[in-house]
Amino acid sequence: MDFFLDTASIESIKSFQDFGLVDGVTTNPALLAQEGQEPLRQLKEIAAMVAGPVSAQVVETDPERIIKHAQKLARVADNIVVKIPASTAGLLAAQALRAEGIKLLVTLNVHAVQTIPFIRMGVDYVAVFVGRLDAAKLDSTSLTWDTRRVIDQLNSPTKLMAASLRTPDHLTNAVAAGIHVATVSPAFWNQVFANPIFTSVEREFLQSWQQLPQELRRGYESWDDEEAG
């Protein structure tokens, strides 16, 4: 399973690459707009610094215009995967773009049935919007499991991506369902590793350790073997 960082921030990508959590990057128009830079230049810079797939989303809704924009985005770099919407317009565009060999990520899927024509076609990725369903008080867990079953049943090469992850449970449930890719924002990872229970227990351990006199702690704490001996 791969982790794609959901951001258009160069700084965030560099930071999370150090943790080994950037197998790819997912951008969208909103994320690019947040950076306040020229979007195409920003996308080129991201594609150059990331070895894996980098997604770029079309901003059109008409099939012919989706195709034209997708063709332009695909030319940015060899590792670009073009995001197109899970709509009838997207379906028409996908047929033409697949014939050209353009890598596709079908986004905005909120029901497994939406993904079926694209999975049958064999697009590269379908992204299920987990957090969006929970926000609408719908069952996001079934969405992920059902979509994975569709992929298996159709014996498709399409990879399942879990997107719009908002809580740690979203990620663990998605992994259990057999996703191929989790697209995770920097804010999500920061939330995971700032768990208040972890912070409290870690502080408790260290406070207990500090109660031992320093001369007794020295050998245990030292990373110098001679001093430790």
Image: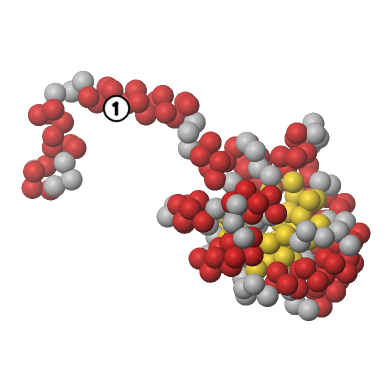
Dot 1 falls on a residue whose secondary structure is: helix
Of 69 and 79, which appears nearest the observer? 69
Q: Is residue 80 above or below residue 2?
A: below
Q: Residue at x 65, y 68 (%)?
A: 80
Q: Few, some or many C-alpha atoms within 10 Å of disc 1 (few <14, some 14-19, many ≥20)?
A: few
Q: Is residue 150 above or below residue 142?
A: below
Along the horizontal axis of the image, is 188 left or right of 208?
right
Q: Residue furthest bottom?
A: 100
Which quarter of the image is occupied by the C terminus?
Answer: top left
Point 51% across, 39% down: residue:
190
Q: Residue at x 71, y 39 (%)?
A: 131
Q: Residue at x 83, y 65 (%)?
A: 66
**In the rendered view of the protein, which quadrant contains the N terminus?**
bottom right
Q: Amino acid at mark 1?
A: Leu
Q: Position of residue 132 (x, y in %)?
A: 75, 40
Q: Nearer the viewer, residue 160 or 109?
A: 109
The picture quadrant where one finds residue 216 is top left
- What x and y, as percent, mark residue 122? 79, 68
Residue 119 appears in the rendering? yes
> With 165 as the anchor, is 104 left or right in this view?
right
Residue 120 appears in the rendering: no
Q: How is the image coloured?
A: secondary structure
Q: Which residue is mark 1?
A: 206
| Figure disc tally | 1
Question: Residue 176 in the image: x percent, y percent?
Answer: 65, 45
**Image position, residue 102 (x, y; %):** 74, 73
- Classify 62 as above or below 32: below
Residue 132 located left or right of residue 87 = left
